[in-house]
Structure formats: C-alpha cells, structure tokens
Image (cartoon, helix red, strand yellow):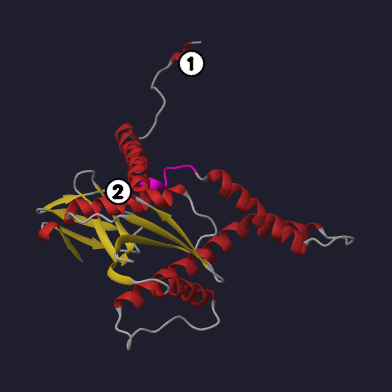
Amino acid sequence: MSHLYGGEVVVSFDPDAKRDRYKVTDRGEKVKPPSVTTITNLKDKSTPLMKWAVNCAISICREKVLPDQIHGQQFLEDVWKEATENYSTVRKKAADVGTQVHYALERYFKDPPDIFAPPLSGTPVRARFDEAIKWFNARPIKNICTESVVYSRKHNYIGTLDNLSEVSNVLTLVDFKAAKSVYSTYIFQAAAYIMARAEETGEKAEQIYILQIGEEKTIPYRYGPAEIETAFEGFLGLLHMYDAEKKLGRIRPEETDWIEEL
C-alpha cells in the first residue's frame, strides 16, 4: 500500500491481476489511471520484434534439420511447430530472468546487509546482478527509494519507478533493463516517472540512467534535462493517443442495409 500527496491518494498494487493491477483512491474517490507501460506499449515495436521472432524460429530449424539427411514428415511437422513457438519460450525465459534481476536489486537496496540474500552463484540472474552492482559501486551513490509508486494527478497516469538515487550528488532516476536492446519507450517511461514524482514532491530528477544489464557487462545510457523534457513530450503524445482511443471505443461498422440494396 502506498500513500501519496500527503495521504490523499492511496494506491494498492496486485502484480497477479490480469487487469487494473493498480487500485487508486484520490480523496476517497476511486480513479482508474492507465499505467505508464500500458501507455508506452502503444508505440509500435513490431519491426525489430518480428526480426527477432524469425531468428528464434530459424535457430530451431538449424539445430534440428541437419544437412544431407532425410527427415520424415512428422519429424518436420514437429520441428516447424517448435520453431513457431520458440520465440515465446525465449521471451518467457528472458522475462523471468529480468524479473528476478529486478527483485534482487530491489532487495539489495531495501534489505539490511546482514539480511540480504543475493541470487544463487553461477546463474544468469546472479551474473547480471553482479554487473549492476559493479556499476553502482564505481561511483558515489545515495539511494533515495526503490520500486516506488508514482502517480500524476495532472495527467492521470501511474507507474512504479525502479530506483531513485543521488549519483555523484545528482538526483537520478535509474532504470534497470535486462533486455538485449534499448528502446525510446524506456526513456519515455523514465521521464514520466520523473514528472509524476516531481508533481507530487516538488523534487525533479536531473538525469536518467538506463542500465542495460548483461551477464558480462552493464551498459549505461545517460539522458540529461533537455532530453527528459523531450521524452516526456513523447510520452504525453502516447497518452493523448490512449485517451483518444478510449473515447472512440470499439470500432464498429456502420449499421446499414445499403449492401443488401445493391
């Protein structure tokens, strides 16, 4: 349970809910703000994802269908089925690793050192966790909050930021990503979190660090004040699109019998 705006806004979060994971009450009135990720998901990322899905399918075909060998029809049908579903298997594994890395970093910042238990050694999660901690330990860091809910009354959206810290004495929003690519929507999300928190507290982060956390290294992407403003403009554009689509509702054909009259 989170209490924002001096206790006037109360937020509960259910990670297992299929819809409306955030329950928000503002001055006793229920409101239903969309989440930041719901809004940024409106941006089309299909082209790189389609290429990735195709490569996932090709990797299975290359592994199973060997050259200079005769393969039966049923064997090939099984291979084609596995190939078409491989992207889903790979995505789930990657999502599970990313979720576990996020959780490990959350506990690292929230738990006392004598209680914190790091991920198991020798696992992809531990490798990424260690790389992220190396980045933090290489510079002066003062943790402000981690996995903190933010809500914008002005623009009506909600979300949870990964980490807010003073990095070398600069108030910084740090976003953890275990993905292989960094998209502009990540910056849009981070900017939205910054602006929502600034709206509530009056404190505005001056920079964003998107940390692309791999097993062998962490790649930081830094964005300053001007880029934060630009990214927030992009986020608001997506938010306007979301609101417009919601007002339009379900698209239906005109009810008419003109076709029958032809």
State the image coordinates of residue 136 (x, y, percent, origin top left). 40, 71
Callout count: 2
> Which secondary structure dominates the residues rendered in magenta?
loop
Relative to the observer, which residue lies in front, 13 or 252?
A: 13
Q: Is residue 90 left or right of residue 42?
A: right
State the image coordinates of residue 36 (x, y, percent, origin top left). 33, 51
| Magenta span | 39-44
Residue at (39, 84) in percent of width and height? 117
State the image coordinates of residue 5 (x, y, percent, origin top left). 13, 56
Q: Which mark is residue 21?
A: none
Q: Quadrant of residue 2?
A: bottom left
For mark 2, give the secondary structure.
loop
Relative to the observer, which residue lies in front, 240 or 218?
A: 218
For mark 1, give the secondary structure.
helix
Q: Quadrant of residue 23?
A: bottom left
Residue at (34, 55) in percent of width and height? 207
Q: Residues within 10 Å of mark 1 (few under 14, many from 20)?
A: few
As measured in the structure, the alpha-carbon distance from the residue carrying label 1 to the one carrying label 2 is 40 Å
Q: Earlier in the sequence, mark 1 or mark 2?
A: 2
State the image coordinates of residue 131 (x, y, percent, origin top left). 49, 73
Q: Is residue 180 left or right of residue 237?
A: right
Q: Amino acid at mark 1?
A: Ile
**Closer to the camera: disc 1 or disc 2?**
2
User: Mark 2 sits on what residue?
Assistant: 34
User: Mark 1 sits on what residue?
Assistant: 259
Q: Is residue 215 left or right of residue 137?
A: right
Q: Amino acid at mark 2?
A: Pro
**Can residue 153 be spotted in the picture?**
yes
Q: Residues within 10 Å of mark 2 (few under 14, many from 20)?
A: some
